[in-house]
């Protein structure tokens, strides 16, 4: 993955509503969510959500597909995995990662 693509993806995720939308689409799975369902779940006006979804689409993190009169959005898991792979490439300098590097991070953990 190229650095400019990573920067665009991280920039798109560096906003509260876009991060929430992306996380909701990741949780929704391959079937995705309609724009209306996503707007309702996130309690965002359709016009605001449309802007945020366009940013995520342009960053290559989500896909849109027309089903009848609805637009269905879904996470691009290959792009997400590529981004995670880029961020964790050569983790722990090639050594076995310490327990602290485990991916299951507690939300209660304080970061100093």
Image (tube, rainbow, N blue to C red):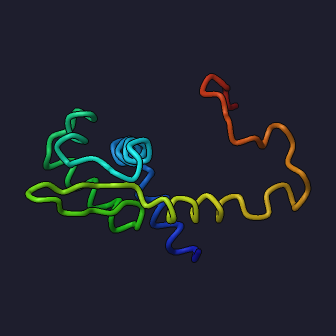
Q: Position of residue 26 (x, y in %)?
A: 44, 47
Classify the position of the N terminus by image quarter.
bottom right
The structure residue drawn at horizontal position 78% and vertical position 43%, both measured from the top left corner, is: 101
Of residues 54 and 70, the one nearer the viewer is 70
42 versus 8 height, above or below = above
Classify the position of the C terminus by image quarter.
top right
Q: Position of residue 68 (x, y in %)?
A: 10, 59
Quadrant position of residue 76? bottom left
105 versus 21 height, above or below = above
Q: Position of residue 21 (x, y in %)?
A: 34, 45
Tally the marks.
0
5 versus 55 height, above or below = below
The structure residue drawn at horizontal position 33% and vertical position 51%, both measured from the top left corner, is: 31
Work out which residue is located at the far left of the displayed protein and give it. 69
The structure residue drawn at horizontal position 79% and vertical position 57%, both measured from the top left corner, is: 91
17 versus 2 height, above or below = above
Quadrant position of residue 57? bottom left
Q: Position of residue 103 (x, y in %)?
A: 69, 42
Judge from the rendering whether residue 35 lies leftward or rightward of residue 55; answer left or right. left
Of residues 97 and 4, the one nearer the viewer is 97
Quadrant position of residue 87? bottom right
Of residues 20 and 15, the one nearer the viewer is 20
Work out which residue is located at the far right of the displayed protein and give it. 95
The structure residue drawn at horizontal position 20% and vertical position 54%, both measured from the top left corner, is: 50
Judge from the rendering whether residue 7 lies leftward or rightward of residue 89; answer left or right. left
Work out which residue is located at the far top of the displayed protein and give it. 108
């Amino acid at each position: 993955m190229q650095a400019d693509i990573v920067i665009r993806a991280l920039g798109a995720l560096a906003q509260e509503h876009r991060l929430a939308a992306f996380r909701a689409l990741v949780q929704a799975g391959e079937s995705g969510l309609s724009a209306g369902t996503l707007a309702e779940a996130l309690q965002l006006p359709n016009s605001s959500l449309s802007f945020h979804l366009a940013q995520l689409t342009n960053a290559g993190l989500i896909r849109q597909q027309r089903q009848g009169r609805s637009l269905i959005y879904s996470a691009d898991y290959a792009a997400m995995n590529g981004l995670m792979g880029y961020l964790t490439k050569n983790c722990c300098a090639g050594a076995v990662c310490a327990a602290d590097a485990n991916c299951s991070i507690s939300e209660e953990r304080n970061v100093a």
